[in-house]
Image (tube, helix red, strand yellow):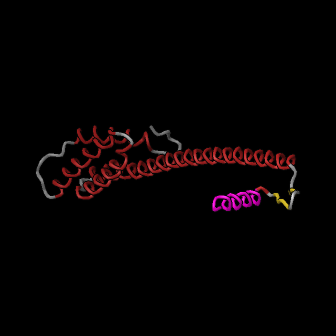
């Protein structure tokens, strides 16, 4: 008896979900079988179209993200080039001032400018390993000038200084200028 009651309840719930009702011996339905099939097919088509649209939007989003990444890389490269030109401009000014101070034997001022120049060269060291080496040499020359400022009696080796300053000036000139292509 219990099983029959459970079956009866199950069949009435199934009829409720199917959208049809049975009254006596007549079955009433909201939609005919043909229209139910049409609605199912239309639902499938709309679902498939929605899936295709979602896939296309995901691809567009991916393309936009890739374009944004490329733009960020380009902006970074441009920023690096501008900074290199800025550092080279400072280095250009510092080497000219250092040369003047060495020529006038103003050793303390020369040491200051050479240390400033070494700082600029160190900033460019990420671009080219030669800049790191030049920064070390500049600090050595700054220390020589500092010793002379303190009253050292050692002779300043002018021909080595001239050779070094010409090599440094050539390196700076490769980076200096608004339209100079950077390595």
Which secondary structure type mostly characterizes the magenta part of the structure?
A: helix
Residue 123 in percent (x, y) is at 36, 50
At x 68%, y 44%, the residue is 56
Left or right: 57 in relation to 171: right
Q: Residue furthest front?
A: 1
Q: Residue furthest left?
A: 153
Query: Taking 128 as reference, is 101 above or below it?
Result: below
Left or right: 142 in relation to 22: left
| 108, 104: nearer the viewer | 108
| 136, 34: nearer the viewer | 34
| 127, 69: nearer the viewer | 69
Residue 1 in percent (x, y) is at 65, 61
User: Is residue 12 shown in magenta?
Assistant: yes
At x 23%, y 53%, the residue is 105
Residue 92 in percent (x, y) is at 39, 48
User: Is residue 9 shown in magenta?
Assistant: yes
Looking at the rendering, the stretch of residues picked out in magenta corresponds to 1-17
At x 63%, y 47%, the residue is 58
Left or right: 66 in relation to 93: right
Quarter of the image where the C terminus is located: top left
Left or right: 17 in relation to 66: right
- Please state the total of marks drawn on the protein image: 0
Residue 131 in percent (x, y) is at 33, 42
């Amino acid at each position: 008896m219990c099983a029959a009651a459970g079956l009866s309840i199950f069949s009435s719930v199934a009829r409720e979900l199917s959208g049809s009702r049975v009254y006596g011996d007549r079955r009433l339905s909201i939609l005919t079988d043909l229209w139910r099939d049409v609605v199912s097919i239309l639902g499938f088509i709309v679902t498939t179209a929605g899936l295709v649209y979602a896939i296309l939007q995901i691809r567009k989003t991916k393309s936009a993200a890739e374009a944004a990444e490329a733009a960020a890389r380009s902006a970074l490269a441009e920023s690096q080039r501008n900074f290199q030109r800025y550092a080279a401009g400072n280095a250009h000014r510092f080497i000219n001032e250092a040369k003047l101070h060495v020529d006038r034997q103003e050793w303390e001022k020369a040491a200051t400018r050479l240390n400033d120049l070494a700082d600029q060269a160190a900033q460019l060291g990420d671009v080219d390993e030669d800049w790191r080496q030049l920064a070390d040499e500049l600090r050595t020359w700054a220390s020589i000038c500092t010793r002379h400022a303190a009253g050292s009696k050692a002779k300043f080796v002018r021909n080595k200084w001239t050779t070094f300053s010409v090599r440094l000036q050539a390196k700076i000139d490769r980076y200096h200028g608004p339209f100079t292509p950077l390595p």
